[in-house]
Each structure stands twice: as structure tokens, then as C-alpha cells.
């Protein structure tokens, strides 16, 4: 069995493949090159950079398993793959803690004007009086999507003394001191709104949803690009309706929305939610183990 790893894999994950006699190549290809290369492999293992559309799946004449080292599989035409008998593996919980921690990195950065202070101090300015921040303790965090990442986010928030409201499209049960309610109630009452849902066909947060929120709300998106309409968010930042936004994911990646990422009220990162050593080790180990198990069944 031969595996193509296009977006890298942790050394611990590679070791698992080696120990089980799985041959693999690590090489990134652009889409056209990948369509040519995929024919030689029994499996392809990707992260978020590589797209696996139907055309690529069809080009993989030997393709038996598709693996995603991460939670989301929206970069893979997984429904088509499954319809022709090709399983799609992923690691939905391995990077949850890393993503949740990034949510708070953005929240703290926004609450204390850290991006702005970094820029101005490097320009030789000392704008101490300009940066009157807020504390997170006592504020209400609204969580949209209460899966693994949402629940870890809630637990951190409770530890900081925040109140937590959460909503999900499915019934959820939790032992955490969290109020499960409707999305409308979350929008109406939250000081910070953090998104933890899959990429939708159309943006979930648009002007309509933003208008339901408190004046001066903060919006954090470390979920998927396309969850938030970037134009509507930019308009709300400019009007002051939204006090700040923490953004790790974008409608187009790499993003070319320079107006948004350079806005003085935002804290931005380049889709690094899972980019910690610990998360990559967990993801690498889990996806390698799953891939070995799947290939051995063939």
C-alpha cells in the first residue's frame, strides 16, 4: 500500500506508518499536478491546504482511502467519495484544545488592544491612554455550535469567570454551568460570540444576525471560512456595531481581503487553530492509526 501525504504529517504519525509497513511519499502538489500524481497511490492524506474534489477522486484509479489530518472535511468531496465506496477518515477531536485556546488568544488580544499596541509601539509611539481595555470576567460568551471545541471553549470561559450561553442544531447535554438556548437569545445577550460550526452553503453570520447582536459585540471565528460574511462583518466594524473581530479563517485562503485583515479593530491569524506541536502530534498519531487500520482491512 502506498500513501501520498500532501500537507505534511508529524514525525510520530510517520513513524506509525513506517512501523506498519506503509510506504508513503510527502509532497505538496498544485491541483493539476496532483490529478496526475494521484493515480499511483492507494490513499491520500491531506490537511486543509489540499482540495480533494470529485475530479481528483476519479483520477485516483487505485484510491481506496482518503484521510484528513484534522476535523473538518469540507475540502474533500466526501459525499461523492463515500457514494463510490471510498471511506473518508478524519480526526474530529484531536485539535479541539488548540482551537479553543486560540479563541481566547483573540479575545484577550481584542479586549486589551494588543494588535494595535504592538503596531504603534514598533513605530515608537507610547499610546498608554488610548488602550482602555475590558475584562473578560463577568462578560457573557455566546457559543454557536456546542461540540467538542465549543465545550472546551465554554470550560475555559467558566474558569475565567464568564457567563456562557450556547446553542446547537442538535440537542446537547452537558454538566457544565452553561445555558443552552436559541441562537436568537445568544445573539441578543452575548458580549462575545464564538463560532464552532462546519462551513455552511451560505454564510451563517450576515447583517441579519449581526443586527440581532448587542451594540459593541465581539465576534470570533476560528471555525471555517464562509461561516461569517466578510463584507457584512467589515461594514459592522466600520459602523461600530461590532467592537472587534478575531479571525483565523477566511472565505478565500490565502485571503486577499486586505481591508478586513488590516482593520484596526481586528485580531487576525492565518488559519493556525490547529497549529500547535501538541495538536499536530495528536492529529498525526490518530490519523496514522486510523489509516493503518483502514488499509489493513483491504
Image: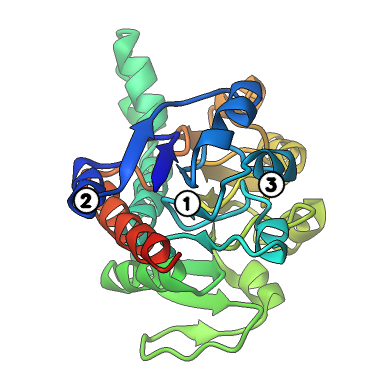
Q: Residue at x 62, y 73 (%)?
A: 186
Work out whether residue 209 or residue 251 is closer to the camera in this orientation and state it.
251
Tag 3 near tag 2, CB within 8 Å? no
Q: Is 234 above or below relative to 144?
A: above
In the structure shown, which secondary structural element does the residue marked by tag 2 occupy? helix
First along the sequence among labels 1 and 2: 1
Q: Which residue is mark 1?
A: 68
Q: Is residue 233 left or right of residue 5?
A: right
- Residue 99's x, y, as percent? 39, 54
Whether 1 is drawn above or below 143: the answer is: above
In primary-sequence order, the first of circles 3 and 2 is 3
188 in relation to 108, above or below: below
Q: How many marks?
A: 3
Q: Which label sits on residue 106?
A: none
CA–CA distance between discs 3 and 2?
A: 27 Å
Q: Choose the circle earlier in sequence order: 3 or 1.
A: 1
Name the residue rendered at 61%, 84% in the picture.
181
Q: Secondary structure at mark 3?
A: loop
Which residue position is annotated with label 2?
Answer: 278
Q: Which mark is residue 226?
A: 3
Q: Are the residues flagged by discs 3 and 1 in contact, CB closer than 8 Å? A: no
**Of 63 and 288, which appears nearest the observer?**
63
Q: Residue 120's spot in the image, x, y percent? A: 37, 17
Residue 144 lies, in percent from the top left, at 58, 68
Amino acid at each position: 500500500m502506498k500513501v501520498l501525504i500532501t500537507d505534511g504529517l508529524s514525525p510520530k504519525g510517520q513513524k506509525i506508518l513506517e512501523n506498519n509497513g506503509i510506504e508513503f511519499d510527502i509532497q505538496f502538489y498544485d491541483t493539476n499536478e496532483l490529478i496526475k500524481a494521484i493515480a499511483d497511490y492507494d490513499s491520500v492524506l491531506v490537511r486543509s491546504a489540499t482540495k480533494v474534489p470529485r475530479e481528483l477522486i476519479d483520477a485516483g484509479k487505485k484510491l481506496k482511502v482518503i484521510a484528513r489530518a484534522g476535523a473538518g472535511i469540507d475540502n474533500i468531496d466526501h459525499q461523492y467519495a463515500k457514494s463510490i465506496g471510498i471511506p473518508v477518515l478524519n480526526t474530529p477531536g484531536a485539535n479541539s484544545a488548540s482551537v479553543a485556546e486560540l479563541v481566547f488568544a483573540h479575545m484577550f488580544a481584542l479586549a486589551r488592544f494588543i494588535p494595535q499596541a504592538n503596531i504603534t509601539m514598533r513605530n515608537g509611539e507610547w499610546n498608554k491612554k488610548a488602550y482602555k481595555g475590558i475584562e473578560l470576567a463577568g462578560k457573557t460568551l455566546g457559543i454557536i455550535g456546542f461540540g467538542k471545541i465549543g465545550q472546551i471553549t465554554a470550560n475555559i470561559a467558566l474558569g475565567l469567570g464568564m457567563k456562557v450561553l450556547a446553542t446547537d442544531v442538535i440537542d446537547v447535554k452537558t454538566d457544565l454551568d452553561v445555558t443552552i438556548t436559541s441562537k436568537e437569545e445568544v445573539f441578543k445577550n452575548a458580549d462575545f460570540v464564538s463560532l464552532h460550526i462546519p462551513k455552511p452553503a451560505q454564510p451563517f453570520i450576515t447583517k441579519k444576525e449581526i443586527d440581532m447582536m448587542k451594540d459593541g459585540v465581539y465576534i470570533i471565528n476560528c471555525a471555517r471560512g464562509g461561516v461569517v460574511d466578510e463584507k457584512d462583518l467589515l461594514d459592522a466594524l466600520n459602523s461600530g456595531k461590532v467592537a472587534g473581530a478575531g479571525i483565523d479563517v477566511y472565505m478565500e485562503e490565502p485571503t486577499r481581503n486586505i481591508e478586513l485583515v488590516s482593520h484596526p479593530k481586528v485580531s487576525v491569524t492565518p488559519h493556525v487553530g490547529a497549529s500547535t506541536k501538541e495538536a499536530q502530534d495528536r492529529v498525526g498519531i490518530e490519523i496514522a492509526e486510523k489509516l493503518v487500520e483502514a488499509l489493513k482491512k483491504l
